[in-house]
Amino acid sequence: MFKTVIDILRKYSLFFLLVIGIISFNLYAFKGDYRVSENVGGVSNYTKVINDKGIKENIKFDSSDLYSLGIWLKMNTLEDDIKVKLLDGSKTIYSGNIPKNDIKAGEAKEVTLRLNGEKGIKVQKNKSYTLVIKDSSKRRYSSLVYLNNQKKLWHKTTYKLLDSKTIKSAAILIEIIILSFLVYLIKFSHYQKRLSKFENQFLLVSIFLIIGYALFIPVYRAPDEAQHFARAYGVLHGIFLVDSSGNINIPNNLIPVVDVVNSNYIDTIKNLHITLNSQLSSTNIINMALYTPQSYVLQSLSIGIISIVTKNVLLIFYGSRILVGILCTLIIYYSIKYIPVGKEVLAICSLLPMNVAERASLSADGFTYTVVIALFSFVIYSLKNENNITNKMKVMMYILVFFLASCKVIYFILGFLILLIPNKKFGSKLKGVWHKLISVIILMGVSVGWLKIASRYLVNTNGGASSSEKVMFMLKHPFNYIEIMNNTLWKNIFVHIEQMIVGPLGALNIEINSGILILLLIVLVRYCVFDFKLNLRVLFIWILCLANVLLIYTSLYVQWTPALNGVSQITEIIGIQGRYFLPILPIMMVSFQLNKINNKDVSIVNDWRSIVSLLVINMMVLSNVIGFFAI
């Protein structure tokens, strides 16, 4: 019996380790009860004096689980603590003090009252309670309370939705069930043979994760997602070019959330009832005006499809998120399926948390990554395939080149990967030269043409006003510019690696535990790095990748880096984010395996453990995201 148990533990050691990891991380991630805050009115210039008799204010609550209460105070003198009571009629249900040390004399400050520690208190929804605030100072008129625009006491209530024990238990149970189900499908079900292929494992895991990230990253909170949503909506309705001011007319309730950078789940709950109206308002999306309308083909298509079914704003938003993510994933699926080497690399890189989060949003970055990977896979497939390129494949190549040039211009350089395809694969050397020449013309024509159009928006972007001066500075002082790039690289290299792989997510303000980054680096090294031989083909790929990195730096230098004291005083490039390097990562890693492309059997054992590990790591990230809003 003991020997049997040991054998099972050895055989499924990874599974048990992953289960232990799920339990341990979720116990860490959910440190507090899950709470949501609601502001009542806003802080105004009105004030009410607290005298020695105190102040009484009637308050109603929107939830029965009251966690904390925030009030704004300004004290002119600090002699004693302020006493606070919450009354239900004559019954005191909360009594506490605001220590005088919590408030600085002469400064307005929000003071948060924890009600019954971490447990909160029970109240009745919409029932009137009395809040009593009494200043024990011997001087009259020593304290001021801020009022909202209805001249009522400004306060912020925080409600407890779920206690930490419940959400921990639910997360652990759900994640273990998902892990067990996936392992069952891959190892024991009648789908075992089909799921032995990496691309099928990737598709299965990706669709689940796309839905998870789409739902659990709060509304509009992916980087610049509200503006991307507005731009895609405009493209759907024929607004292909934005006015030079960056303004676009969209329904005035298309983005009902006021603070999209800090939106949370309560913003979704509050706005679930909103449906699109016909009243338009002007919204500035100057940064998104720099993107071609082709960059939003999947987003606009998805918004159009969901809009047929419903006019609910947030259902359109979340439905489009999921549909865009699935469409991008399907393209990557076929890229993994047909690439002869590096299947594991493409699958793992495409399952990095930042990558999945980008695809499960309305940002143009997910589609850009997808197009780059599709073209790269097409090139590597053509190198291995013994047959000539068919007419359908030529059309596909032109389409991919067109969209690559149409997405972020900084990636156009990767379109030159088509030069790796032997000319004879097109039928003859002459035909090969012609097809490559046409592809390069499309690549350069579309990218340079759009740069010409987009240049009119630069003057209105942050740092773009002095773009021409920066270009001249680079041309006249190339070594100074190299020094600026060098300073930027070494100052931010570790931050960029973290941003590229795991986050921060959301509007780059949802922190992800660094331990997850270490796990992902281990997986990347374990499954993606192999012995390789340097040849001209690999060297050419590396040169293109390096050129792409330089383009990313230069683009952010010209477009985003402000020249406050003159161009010559710039010492660091501003605005570079690690996610910009995501399309380059798998290309570099697959290049390590290209020496195997001429082998008769280039297939590497499809180790399902890497995909399962990525699934669990992503579930941990999602737990981290949910737990982030519970702290």
Image: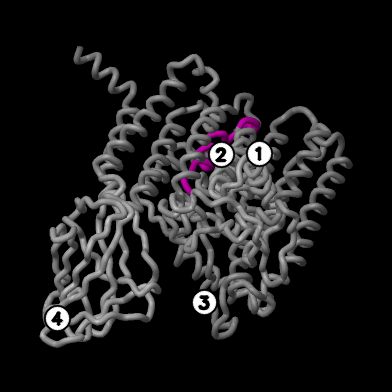
- Label 1 amino acid? Ser
Name the front one of labels 4 and 1: 4
x, y percentage for residue 614? Answer: 44, 37
- Label 4 amino acid? Asp
Q: Is residue 220 left or right of residue 535?
A: left
Instruction: Measure how far apart labels 3 and 4 are at the Cα level.
Output: 58 Å
x, y percentage for residue 288? Answer: 64, 62
Instruction: Measure how far apart labels 2 and 3 are at the Cα level.
Output: 36 Å
Instruction: Relative to 390, say whether 122 is above or below.
Output: below
Contact? badges 1 and 3 (CB < 8 Å): no
Count neighbours of disc 4 (C-alpha within 10 A) and say few if under 14, some if 14 to 19, many if 20 or more: some
Main secondary structure of the magenta stretch: helix
Instruction: Measure how far apart labels 4 and 2 are at the Cα level.
Output: 70 Å
Contact? badges 2 and 3 (CB < 8 Å): no
Q: Which residue is mark 2?
A: 346
x, y percentage for residue 448? Answer: 77, 62
Instruction: Relative to 522, say whether 159 is above or below.
Output: below
Disc with the residue nearer the chain's start (4 vs 1): 4
Q: Which residues are magenta?
A: 337-354
Identify the residue at horizontal 30%, vertical 41% (top origin): 167
Q: Residue furthest bottom?
A: 139
Q: Which residue is mark 4?
A: 52
Name the front one of labels 3 and 4: 4
Count neighbours of disc 2 (C-alpha within 10 A) and say few if under 14, some if 14 to 19, many if 20 or more: many
The question of residue 352 being in magenta is answered with: yes
Point out which mark residue 377 bears.
1
Q: Which residue is mark 3?
A: 571
